[in-house]
Amino acid sequence: MHHEFSILFHPLNALLVALLGAPPAGWQRAMGLEGEAGVWLPDHVVMALLVVVIVAALLIWVRRGYSIEHPSTLQQCLELFLTGLSNLAEDVIGHGRGRDFVPFVAGLAFFIFTSNIFGIVFFLQPPTANTSTTFALSLTAFLFYNIVGIRRQGPLNYAKHFMGPVWWLFPLMVPIEIISHLARVLSLALRLFGNIFGEHTATGMFLIIVPLFVPAMMGLGLLGATIQTFIFVMLTTVYVSGAVAEEH
């Protein structure tokens, strides 16, 4: 449901003020909190930290109870999930190469999906409904696939990706390719933000206008959270595939 702040926003900031005192003006400017007295962390950062804690606790719990002979239901679900991500990476990036990127892709998937489903919990806020979070995720994906491409192929060979199929087109192709790659950051960030923010806002409106439709909206929200996670992960995998492809 749509609320201005999550249930943790005021208590956590009050705790930080009690421990650290009032936040410095420079810190608030860096966090985009100018004019908000007594606020150390914006709500989307509080929620992002909660996502990290939840995912870490879940994985540690599963790891401690890991069993080959008697796997728990949660362990089987996670194994199925990771098998699906591994197959996706192998199919898109290439057999024998995709498994190397499963940890990064799985990290994105866990974080984004958990963030997205916060939108259907009435006392929480989805971090992905804020552009700061979605741009951080898209920049992370952008830096990752470019760094991987440079490490796998070397700077010179990777630079050839930007020069087009024939050498005499490079004055035209280089700026086009650079703009195309930068546009990926914008596309990933705004697509995720727009869908999650829209679903979260629509559910909040239905709660006020027609409360009986809220369960259906929550179901649609869960479906949307899954789809948006898959789209982000799939596109990231495609970008990694293009960065490591030797045929270019």
Image (cartoon, grey):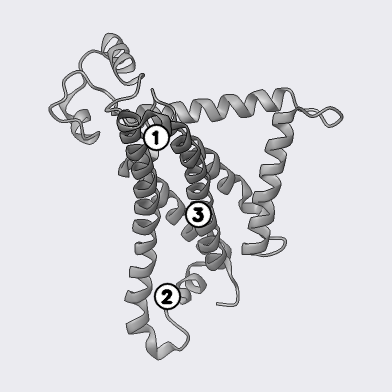
Closer to the camera in the image, 2 or 24: 2
Closer to the camera in the image, 223 or 182: 223
For the C terminus, which image quadrant? bottom right
Query: Counting residues from the N terminus, which is met first, the one under dot 1 or under dot 3?
Result: 1
Residue in the image at 39% along x and 26% along y: 124
Residue in the image at 68% along x and 59% along y: 90
Neighbour tally class for label 1: few under 14, some 14-19, many 20 plus, Cα within 10 Å: many
Residue kind at label 1, given as amino acid type? Pro
Residue in the image at 37% along x and 45% along y: 134
Residue under numbered circle 1 = 126
Residue under numbered circle 3 = 231
Query: Counting residues from the N terminus, which is met first, the one under dot 1 or under dot 2?
Result: 1
Label 1 residue SS: loop
Indicate which label's residue lies in the foreground, 1 or 2: 1
Residue under numbered circle 2 = 162
Closer to the camera in the image, 205 or 45: 205
Query: Counting residues from the N terminus, which is met first, the one under dot 2 or under dot 3?
Result: 2
Name of the residue lying farthest toward the left: 35
Side of 247 where 124 appears, left or right:
left
